[in-house]
Image (cartoon, coloured by chain):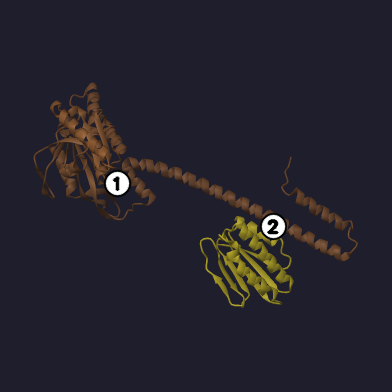
Chain colours: A brown, B yellow
Amino acid sequence: MSYELFTDETEIITQGEAYLEQGAFADPEAAKRYAELLKQYKKLLKNLQRLMKLSDRNEEKLNAMAHVMEEKNKIQEALSANLSKYLSPQIVHSLLTGEKGTDLVTQRKKLTVFFSDIKDFTKTTENMQPEDLSYLLNSYFTEMSKIALHYGATIDKFIGDAMLMFFGDPETRGVREDAEACVRMAVAMQRRMRKLQSTWRFRGYKDPFHMRIGINTGYCNVGNFGSEDRMDYTIIGGEVNLAARLEVQAEPDGILISSDTYALVQDIVEAEERPKLMAKGIEREIIPYAITNIYDEELGCPDLIRSEFKGLRIIADLERVNAEDKGAIIESMEQLLARLREEPAG
Amino acid sequence: MSTLHIPATERTPELLFDFAANTFSLKGESYPENIAEFFGEPVGKLKEHLGAQAGQRIAFHFALPYFNSSSAKTIMGLFSLLDQAAEDGNDVLITWTCEEGDDMQEMGEEFAEDLDAAKFELKFLE
């Protein structure tokens, strides 16, 4: 059954024409005016039909354009996902959203820089079959990258067996928070390495990889370095060299941080001071700290009590409390409680 | 009446009404945010001007690659005004420029169906 959109209007015109043909108007002037009105009505109906046609056509074009845009978005998303495997996802996002450009521009920013490598990589792998080496390296980089992305690191590059990452650009949560995230990530990586080492041993690799990590916080130049045709989004500066220097000094499976980073993360880590060292491009003497433990719920520290309020910060690791200190600790806590109850708030 | 010239914007066409030369044109996309604000004054002046013309040669040139429904209603009104001017004894030529085979060709031809006295000419972009 066909559907006519303008049945009613057509019926009115048919009736109107029939009146005229039947000579329904006694007055010729009235008939003439009626005929003119009917003509105008036909014209207006035609205009309405054209407008509806135009509106429908424009809507169709708009829908087609929206479809094309949707397809383009899908392609861009796929491209972005692929690019994120070659470049740091934060950098890809910054480029796609236009937050960062491709001019050879750098900025000076306070970053926490992470450097790692595999101890004695060349010696460990010189007798290894290429397939075995690929398996070990790929499983190592895959696991470490997952952890890095989880903690929000900007992965700068993989250099052979080494990794360079940083926190604080293009996104920052604050200098202290960036440093804490970096140290948490480093601890998570070393813990994951222990599990990987077991897996590798189980698979027959006698000398599994041992990672060394160096971390430093300081002002670096970050941005596009290279030429107008080929550039890298990377960091340079003495503070980057210091992170590399710390990494070389770190023990296998260890994390060595500078005093600048330690100052920012001392509330969440337990660390031991190590002999002073010097680094190229850094005039000051560096006091390194080796991380021995971390107070972090996600990384697992069940006896840790950690609360922070304005004017009061509590970090308690009950496992480390000596029996002889308990009395004094309880006395201090009771004094604190008494003062808190006495003093009016605010 | 002095010449009226409104440069094109992203949403409105270039409007050039040269009343002294009796040449008028609309060029560009037309989907104004406020149709009355854009077309109100020019169309009012054109209506007043055409009503006072007799035995004149009048040319109106349309080159609109895209327009919305409100603009279409205005264009149909302009066609009607121009046809009336032709019926009043003027030599009126409407030229409609578009791409060959484009939807705009069909729209122009449909608008021209209602013309009784004004001449209509289609021109294709090369």
A43 sits to left or right of A207: right
- Three-letter code, disc 1: Thr
Tell me if residue A39 comes above or below residue A298 in the rendering.
below
x, y (%) of residue A265?
21, 40
Q: Which residue is located at x 26 percent, y 54 percent?
A: A106
Label 2 Cα crowd, 10 Å radius (few <14 / some 14-19 / many 20+):
some
Q: Quadrant of the C terminus of chain A?
A: top left
Residue A161 picture quarter: top left
Looking at the image, which is closer to me, B63 or A24? Answer: A24
Tell me the number on the disc at residue A47.
2
Tell me the number on the disc at residue A130.
none
How far apart marks 2 and 1 lie (CA) works out to 59 Å
Mark sitting earlier along the chain (2/1): 2
Looking at the image, which is closer to me, A264 or A60? Answer: A264
x, y (%) of residue B85?
70, 71
- Three-letter code, disc 2: Asn
Secondary element type, mark 1? loop
B91 sits to left or right of A106: right
Residue A180 picture quarter: top left
Q: Which residue is located at x 23 percent, y 49 percent?
A: A110
Q: Give the residue pinned by disc 1.
A: A172
Q: Which residue is located at x 28 percent, y 49 percent?
A: A233
Q: Which residue is located at x 32 percent, y 46 percent?
A: A91
x, y (%) of residue B43?
63, 68
- Outermost residue toward the left? A275
Tell me if residue A183 comes above or below residue B97 in the rendering.
above
The chain ID associated with circle 1 is A
The chain ID associated with circle 2 is A
